[in-house]
Amino acid sequence: EVLELGTDKSYALVRYAKAIGDKKRAAMFLRSDLKIAGITLGEHSAIALNAARSLAQARLRDRADAEDGTAQDADKAVRALGTKLRRNGAPTAKLQRKRRGGRFVVRVELDPHEAMELAKRFVGASR
């Protein structure tokens, strides 16, 4: 059955099953041609299976983050920093919480003129 699928699709299926935490389901997909996201395995490409795996992993991470509060803490920090930046010369600042590796980081987008104003205000003040 694996040979009929091809190595790319078989490997993608195993990675998908691992991501959802149920390795036995991979064998079930092969035996009965069950559906993933409403599409039978034979109709899926390896790229689609990898996308389904990524989505399953993101859902598991979101669930874990919600349970331990780290996402909420990161969001709170993003809001606080955004407020400070906007009040101190960067009214169009855009902030976003991102996950990089196993931790959260904050992405900040600033208008170049606003960035210069902030640099003058904070870097110039420390000299």
Image (cartoon, rainbow, N blue to C red):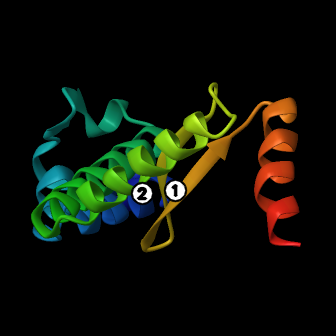
Is residue 101 rendered to the left or right of residue 64? Answer: right
Is residue 117 rendered to the left or right of residue 103? Answer: right
Q: Residue 73: percent from the left, percent from the top?
A: 28, 61
Is residue 45 rendered to the left or right of residue 20? Answer: right
| Residue type, label 1 | Asp
Mark seen at residue 102: none
Q: 89 or 103: which is nearer to us?
A: 89
Q: Tag 1, which secondary structure?
A: helix
Q: Residue 116: percent from the left, percent from the top?
A: 87, 42
Q: Residue 17: percent from the left, percent from the top?
A: 24, 62
* Residue beneath the point at 63% across and 46% down: 108
* Residue beneath the point at 54% across and 55% down: 106
Residue labelled with disc 1: 8
For the C terminus, the quadrant is: bottom right
Tally of numbered discs: 2
| Residue type, label 2 | Ala
Q: Tag 2, which secondary structure?
A: helix
Q: Quadrant of residue 13?
A: bottom left
Asked whether disc 2 touches disc 1, contact meaning CB atoms under 8 Å apart, the reply is yes
Q: Residue 125: percent from the left, percent from the top?
A: 81, 63
Image vertical order of residue 68 relative to residue 10, above or below = below
Q: Residues within 10 Å of mark 1 (few under 14, many from 20)?
A: some
Residue labelled with disc 2: 12
For the N terminus, the quadrant is: bottom left
- CA distance separating discs 2 and 1: 6 Å
